[in-house]
Image: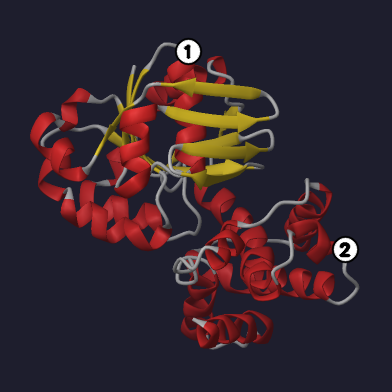
């Protein structure tokens, strides 16, 4: 099949390489020095279970619009920072509307799928999570990744909704991912899964950027570990704004998951170290937005968010 990854960072490049090794056609939308390196030297990935260094098809947005049709692809994957979702959907709006290709979000946060649905319709919107994977650009054209790198995906907002993406086609994509060495499962309620991941993201991402500590150090620390858990509880408290119920068991399970996972630098910590904008709006900002809507206090999330904004 033919896949377009909009966003050629650690996550997109790792999954794209897996699909390419299986014989699928993969195109990456990239920019800057990273794009030049991909075009001139190919893509290099180091992972405990994967060594990849091959030529790849990488383009900038002007080339994508001039040389490709939306119908050239069977699936489009968004692997950008959450803050870039609305701008790229707007920039590619006319191009995307020339075909009925589904768009799968593998991004942080809970606001990407609603933006895709608003732009393209529910039947073209797939929700997804990149689970237990750390992946970063360590140099132009070079990716370092770790973890089992699983994917959870599903029709938006859940399988019980009307006008969703074709379930049989979704099964086909999941089967192809699994054949490519990407452990993948379909969730009947992907919106609930996205909120469960936000438990982890809000718990460790902002705090790691603030403290410059990895996930294992945070969760095992006598004070920071408690703060991580409380920030996860605050996510559960505001999830009802999206008609999602997160139980204490959900919080405990996600806290145990991130506590037992390999010590990794979060994406927000890596961005902090490299001087890039932080994904605050898509993570802690999304939690704060719902808290305002519900008129409830979430002091831990608000404090960490405010401190990071001050540093920015």
Query: Which quadrant of the view contains residue 133?
Result: top right
Structural crowding at the residue carrying mark 2, measured as other residues with C-alpha within 10 Å and reported as few (<14), some (14–19) or many (≥20)? few
Q: Earlier in the sequence, mark 2 or mark 1?
A: 1
Front residue of this view, candidates 173 and 35: 35
- In this rendering, is residue 222 above or below 41? below
Which residue position holds label 1? Answer: 22
Which residue position holds label 2? Answer: 220
- The span from disc 2 to disc 1 (Cα, nearest Å) is 39 Å
Front residue of this view, candidates 120 and 311: 311
Q: Give percent across and percent down for residue 45.
A: 55, 31
Residue at the outermost top position: 23
Q: Secondary structure at mark 2?
A: helix
How many numbered marks does the figure carry?
A: 2
Q: Give percent across and percent down for residue 64.
A: 17, 36
Front residue of this view, candidates 28 and 191: 28
**Residue at 17% of width from left, 27% of height from top?**
71
Q: Secondary structure at mark 1?
A: loop
Q: Give percent across and percent down for residue 302.
A: 60, 84
Q: Are marks 2 and 1 in contact (CB under 8 Å)?
A: no
The answer to whether any part of residue 253 appears in the image is yes
Q: Give percent across and percent down for residue 206.
A: 61, 70
**Residue at 47% of width from left, 59% of height from top?**
110
Structural crowding at the residue carrying mark 1, measured as other residues with C-alpha within 10 Å and reported as few (<14), some (14–19) or many (≥20)? some
Q: Quadrant of the N terminus?
A: top left
**Residue at 62% of width from left, 23% of height from top?**
50
- In this rendering, is residue 74 above or below 93? above
The answer to whether any part of residue 174 appears in the image is no
- Horizontal placement of 134 versus 70: left or right? right
- In this rendering, is residue 214 above or below 191? below
Residue at the outermost right position: 222
């Amino acid at each position: 099949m033919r896949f377009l990854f909009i966003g050629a960072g650690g996550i997109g490049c790792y999954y794209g390489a897996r699909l390419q090794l299986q014989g699928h056609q993969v195109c990456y939308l990239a920019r800057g020095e990273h794009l030049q390196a991909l075009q001139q030297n190919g893509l290099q990935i180091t992972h405990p279970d994967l060594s990849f260094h091959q030529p790849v098809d990488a383009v900038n947005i002007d080339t994508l619009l001039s040389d490709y049709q939306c119908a050239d692809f069977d699936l489009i994957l968004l692997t950008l920072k959450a803050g870039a979702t609305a701008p790229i959907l707007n920039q590619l709006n006319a191009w995307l509307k020339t075909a009925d290709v589904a768009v799968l979000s593998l991004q942080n946060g809970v606001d990407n799928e609603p933006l895709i649905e608003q732009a393209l319709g529910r039947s073209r919107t797939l929700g997804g999570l990149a689970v237990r994977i750390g992946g970063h650009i360590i140099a132009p054209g070079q990716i370092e990744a770790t973890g089992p790198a699983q994917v959870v995906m599903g029709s938006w907002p859940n399988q019980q909704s009307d006008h969703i993406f074709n379930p049989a086609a979704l099964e086909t994509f999941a089967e192809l991912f699994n054949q490519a060495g990407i452990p993948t499962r379909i969730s009947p309620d992907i919106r609930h899964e996205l909120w469960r991941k936000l438990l982890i993201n809000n718990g460790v991402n902002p705090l790691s950027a603030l403290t410059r500590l990895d996930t294992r150090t945070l969760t095992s620390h006598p004070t920071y570990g408690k703060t991580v858990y409380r920030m996860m509880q605050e996510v559960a408290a505001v999830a009802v704004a999206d008609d999602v119920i997160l139980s204490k068991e959900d919080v405990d399970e996600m806290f145990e998951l991130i506590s037992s996972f390999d010590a990794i630098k979060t994406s927000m910590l890596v961005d902090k170290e490299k001087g890039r904008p932080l994904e605050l709006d898509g993570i802690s900002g999304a939690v704060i937005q719902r808290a305002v809507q519900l008129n409830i206090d979430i002091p831990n999330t608000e404090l960490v968010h405010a401190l990071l904004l001050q540093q920015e």
